[in-house]
Image: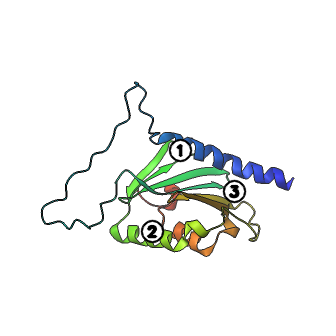
């Protein structure tokens, strides 16, 4: 029975991850058969230091977090872009709200992500207390994906959760 609950808890998460992953650019061109678009690099502005860091691509994803389960068994995903804009998605990857983090909120999220050190986290966090009707979280950041039950998440990942916008409009935030 326990194995069935684990599979039942992960299945909506995997579905959401596949749907969200399918929404992004694939790099293989577009549907009309045209070759993929390439980016061009422009020369630095006059007076700019050649060693200055490039500005982040506003369309690049900073972090994606999917939360599933809970009493109602719902799935929601938050996608936060490098520029601080965010989108809340439902279980079918349909948009449910958007917003933008303030500079201070974005800085706090970036700090939490850096401190989490995704490269060193276990891919699946286990061992915490069982929280009935708790949530299961899946994080994607910097090329790494980590996940775990609410009671098993390392403190560094709970700091990331604290820095995110709300998963539902009922929690607050803009829509």
- The dot on residue 21 is 1
Residue shown at the point (37%, 27%) measured from the top left? 34
Residue ID for mark 3: 71
Cα separation, mark 2 vs mark 1, equals: 22 Å
Residue shown at the point (18%, 65%) measured from the top left? 48
- Disc nearer the start of the sequence (2/3): 3
Label 2 crowd (10 A; few <14 / some 14-19 / many >=20): many
- The dot on residue 128 is none
Asked if labels 1 and 2 touch by Cβ distance under 8 angstroms, the answer is no
Asked if labels 3 and 1 touch by Cβ distance under 8 angstroms, the answer is no
Point out the frontmost of discs 2 and 1. Answer: 1
Q: Tell me if 66 is positioned left or right of 72 in this view.
A: left
Quarter occupied by residue 84 = bottom left
Residue ID for mark 2: 109
Residue shown at the point (66%, 60%) measured from the top left? 135
Label 3 crowd (10 A; few <14 / some 14-19 / many >=20): few
Vertical arrangement, residue 95 with respect to residue 84, above or below: above
């Amino acid at each position: 029975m326990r194995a069935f609950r684990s599979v039942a808890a992960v299945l909506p998460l995997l579905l959401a991850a596949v749907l969200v992953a399918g929404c992004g650019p694939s790099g293989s061109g577009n549907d009309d058969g045209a070759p993929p678009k390439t980016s061009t690099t422009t020369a630095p502005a006059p007076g700019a230091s050649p060693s200055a860091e490039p500005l982040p691509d506003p369309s690049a994803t900073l972090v994606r977090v999917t939360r599933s389960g809970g009493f109602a068994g719902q799935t929601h995903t938050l996608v936060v872009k490098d520029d601080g804009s965010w989108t809340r998605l439902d279980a079918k990857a349909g948009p449910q709200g958007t917003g933008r983090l303030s500079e201070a909120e974005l800085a706090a999220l970036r700090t939490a992500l850096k401190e989490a050190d995704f490269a060193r986290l276990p891919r699946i966090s286990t061992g915490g207390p069982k929280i009935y009707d708790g949530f299961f979280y899946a994080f994607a950041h910097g090329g790494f994906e980590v996940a775990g039950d609410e009671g098993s998440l390392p403190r560094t990942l709970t700091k990331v959760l604290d820095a995110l916008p709300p998963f539902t409009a009922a929690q607050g935030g803009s829509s």
